[in-house]
Structures are given as C-alpha cells and as structure tokens.
Amino acid sequence: MTAQSKVRSQAEPPTDGARRTPWVLAVLGMLMSFSSIATDIYLPAMPSMARALGAQPGGLELTISGYLIGFSLGQLVWGPIGDRFGRRGPIAAGLVLFLLGCAGCALSQSVEQVIAWRVVQAAGACAGVVLARAMVRDLYQGDRAAQMLSTLITIMAVGPLLGPILGGQVLLVASWRTIFWILAAIGAATLAALATLPETLPAERRSRQSPGQALAGYWMLLRQRRVVGYVMAGAFFCVGFFAYLAGSPFAYIEFHHVPAQSYGLLFALGVLGVMASNTINARVVRRIGIDRSLRLGGLGVVVAAAALAVNATTGWGGLAGLVASLFVFVSMQGFILANAMAGALQPFPQAAGAVSALAGALQYGAGIVGSTLVGLLADDTPRPMAWVIAVAAAGVLASVLGLPRPNRPET
C-alpha cells in the first residue's frame, strides 16, 4: 500500500453495513436528543418550580445557564477522549453521570442545588451528543454527512416535540420532581440501547494525542477561518435559541396567560418546524451545497427576528404574532445547525471528536449568553427575549456571509 492510499484509507469512513442500519441511526438520534430533552421536558414546570423553591425573578432561567456551562465545557473533555478510546465507552460513562445529575435535581431543595446538579447532568449528557456527531463523521463524508445529520435531527426532534407536552401533563398528577425521575429513566433506557451499537472508530484509526496535544489541536482548529465561520454561525443561532428556551415559558404562561398544559402544544409547533426544515435540508443540501443552505437559514432567522422584535416592542400581532415569529426563527435550525456542524467536520476526519467538541462547546457556550441575558434583563415582558434573538440573528447572517470561499468544491 502506498503512502497516499494509506492516508486515503484512514480518512475514509468505513463502508460496512453499520451505517445503513436504521437501529443505529435511531440510537444516535436518541443520544443527540439529550441536548434538548433534558431542558425541554421541564420548561412548563419552570413557573411552578420558581414558586416552590422561592426563586427570585430570573432565578429559574439560570438552571438553563448552568446546564449550558456543563454541556459546553464537558464537550471539550469528551471529544478528545472519544478520539483516543473509541466512542461507546465514553458515551456510557457520560450516561451514568447524567443519571446522577437527574437524581440530584429531583432531590434538590433550592434553586442553587438545582443549578449545581444541572451542571453535573449536562456534563454527562454532552458525551452522547458530541460523540454521536463524531460517529456520523466516522460513517459519512461531506454533504452526505450534512444530509445524515439533518435526518438524525429530524429523528431526535420527537423528544423535544413530546417533552414539554409530557412535562405539562406530569404537572397535572405529580410535582416537578417527577419530571427529573422520568429523565433518569430515559437515560437508563438509552444506556441499554447503547450496548447494541457497533464501535465506529476501530483501534487503528484512534488518536494517540496527549491531553496537552489535544489542547494544542483546539488552538489549531481555531486558526482555521472557514471552520470558525461555520462554528460561529451555529453559535449565534444558539444564543437566540436558548434565549427562546429561557424566555418563552414566561412570555407565554405569565405574560400571555397561556395554561402550562398548553405551553407544550405551542412549543411543539416549533419542533414540527425544525423537523420540516431538516427534512427539506436533507433533500436539497446535496444539490445546492452546505453554504447555500446556510445562507437560506441566515436570511430566514433575520426576517423572523425582525418581526419578533416589532411584536414584543409594540404588541402588534399579540400572541399570534409572537407564536408565528418564534415558529419561523426556531424552524431555521434545520438549515443552520446540521450544515454548520458538517461544514466544520468536513476537513478533519481524523479529529472528528475534537472538532465536534469544539463546535459544540462554542455553540452551547454561546447559549449561556442567550439564556443568561434573558434572565438578567427579565422585566415580565417578552422584550428581553426578542431583542437577544434579534442580535443573535444578525450574527448568524454575518457569519454565513463572511465564510471564505473553499479551496475546492464542497462536493
């Protein structure tokens, strides 16, 4: 084997039947859904949690910020570990940590305790998310990887689609603590399903980097302008998206007096939009390319954010206007996150775990900014949420339009 063919064989993903197994894709979708279901399921309970725990205004929003802190920093650890030791073992360890965090949240007696255990919960959950994305890169390349990520996001959207609805119904018969025990049961079921997955990173393709070399690798990735452009597009979207997660329960339930049980239905509209946009993206991205799909999403979020800012500032459109503008904004996720992640992963097949970790850490770290700003600026109106989303949408479009041209065709 020549040196050139050896490099090619290392860069190409395996072509065995594993990547065509629907069950493998279903489990990967379950793993990726932890980024959203662990938060979405308790969104309807946030006002009642605030009352039960005696939280100050904006205090419950910080439980989302705490989750994002653990989620963003944890990915930087799990990514290189997954590149060195394979995917399945680190994911299993993360799921055990997630179970401990769920139990801690359920037993908490103060908002501060919930925040601390949410950090633990997120540090475990992110292992499955970051390494599931790396497993996709193990199995697929280029625009095909973007297509499969869109497919997986469509699968995983079932969780957040049902999560707020389930959380609202639980509140009818039990307390908010039961929601976290349900999350623990979901984590245990996913751990059992993980045992059926094949290992997608064989020993001969694993990294031999030390922790210091892994940190240096992150610095190298941050010097790649095109990678940074993709990552920042996703990061700015996450600023707006997590502002939506933190602000929408209070905007709907407290400001517009929507019943907590109905909040899940309004939230589900956005999830259906995400599923639709990911389905469309999966069909068109191989024809028009990653960058064009990203530009489509960037334009969409700017239009939606402008309408949202007008609604929140003037009251024009009322509840219907708020729902419609948030629906369009959230739906654009399908054209932004999958393409941004696939674009960042494409040049570095041998460091898919590290690239996925860096992108995810920066994106969810940016989400901390969105949710925290909504909490700090809370004024019992939708205005803080709307204007944080508007600024974030402008950042998405600027990042997409500022992408340098690729040195070779994307496909």
Image (cartoon, rainbow, N blue to C red):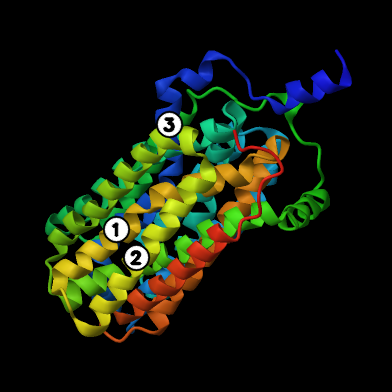
Please tell me which of labels 1 and 2 falls first in the chain. Answer: 2
Asked whether disc 1 touches disc 2, contact meaning CB atoms under 8 Å apart, the reply is yes
**Identity of the residue drawn at 35% across and 36% down:** 155
Asked whether disc 1 touches disc 3, contact meaning CB atoms under 8 Å apart, the reply is no
Distance (Cα) linking label 1 and label 2:
9 Å
Q: Which residue is denoted by mark 2 in the rendering?
A: 303
Vertical placement of 39 versus 194: above or below? below
Q: Secondary structure at mark 2?
A: helix
Quadrant of image for the N terminus: top right
In-image side of 9 versus 334 (left or right): right
Instruction: Give the amino acid at mark 1.
Output: Val
Residue 296 position in % (x across, y down): 42, 52
Residue 401 position in % (x across, y down): 55, 59
Please tell me which of labels 1 and 3 falls first in the chain. Answer: 3
Residue 81 position in % (x across, y down): 68, 42
Instruction: Give the amino acid at mark 2.
Output: Val
Residue 140 position in % (x across, y down): 57, 28
Q: Which residue is denoted by mark 3 in the rendering?
A: 27
Asked whether disc 2 touches disc 3, contact meaning CB atoms under 8 Å apart, the reply is no
Instruction: Give the amino acid at mark 3.
Output: Val
Q: Is residue 127 visible?
A: no
Q: Which residue is denoted by mark 1 in the rendering?
A: 328
State the residue in front, 97 or 239. Answer: 239
